[in-house]
Amino acid sequence: MNSQNDPPLLTGGDEDQLILKLADAYRQTESPESEEWVRVIAEKTSRILTEQAEEE
Amino acid sequence: MPNAMPETPVSLLTRLRDMEAGASWESSWKVFLELYQEPLRIMAWNCYRHHTGGAAPTEEFVADAVANVVSDFYTRAQYRYDPLRGKLRRFLKTITNARVVDLLRKERPLDHIELGSYEGTAAESEAEGLAFQRSVLATLVEDLRNRIPLRQFEVFEMVKLKGMSAEAAATVLGVKRGIVDNTIHRAMNAVRELAKDPVYAQEYYP
């Protein structure tokens, strides 16, 4: 369950740390490997959604 | 007198978690796919290994499983996420496990594959958790992109996300160093505001 005690993502002096993590996450989503996976899965998802729409 | 103060935009993660009100997310499932495909792929991989006694799935199988999860997430009412019942990560794991079992039953019709619930080993859970945390942070970056002026985001992207020096960014953009510094300052204010949103912390921490 979501905890009310979770600290915010940015507290006090850990701003540099957060930026490093954001940069890491950004690089991951922008990487060629990720983009290729997204392309392949998007094609499959589009096909599934189209088939579902036709069935309805 | 009308209220002149603009409403605070609702974060992408909040809209993602609020599927009933999240029509804009529904129409942009590709954004969800871009941001969350990594943890979903790891979950699908782990679920496959669990149900097959350690066999490795093909990339095709993993892609099919994730595609089914994404389409389920956006089209089937029974898969609506309820934040009061648990974290988004657990919800996605439950759907992923179900879709992997569906596909496995087609792939191995003679095997008796039980759905059951599946938690995974500590190592698997850690890998999924780290990937999911990256997705939450990538969602924050996407939120930032949508919240601040494009030029401001581009400067933030060059310096803070891609690691270019402020001096080099100023040269590339043909502006004074002070303008880059001021732009970064404003973008960082927006990052601080976004990072205060408790929804991010709730989904980021295990």
Image: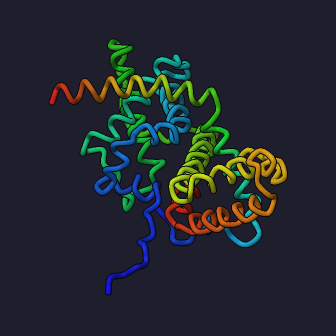
Dividing the picture into quadrants, the one containing residue B180 is: bottom right
Is B154 located above or below residue B69 in the figure? below
- Where residue A9 appears, x then y in whole percent? 63, 63
Is A3 located above or below residue B70 in the figure? below
The residue sitting at 47% across, 55% down in the picture is: B13
The scheme the figure's colours follow is: rainbow
In the image: residue B144, left or right of residue B176: left
Front one among B193 and B88: B193
- Where residue B204 appears, x then y in whole percent? 57, 56
Front one among A13 and B186: B186
The residue sitting at 68% across, 54% down in the picture is: B156
Give the quadrant of the C terminus of chain A.
top left
Front one among B97 and B183: B183
Outermost residue toward the bottom in this view: B1
Dividing the picture into quadrants, the one containing residue B144 is: bottom right
In the image: residue B16, left or right of residue A5: left
How many marks do you count on the picture?
A: 0
- Where residue B152 appears, x then y in whole percent? 63, 56
Front one among B85 and B154: B154
Is B20 located above or below residue B119 in the figure? below
Outermost residue toward the left in this view: A56
The residue sitting at 51% across, 29% down in the picture is: A38
- Where residue B151 appears, x then y in whole percent? 62, 53
The residue sitting at 34% across, 34% down in the picture is: B71
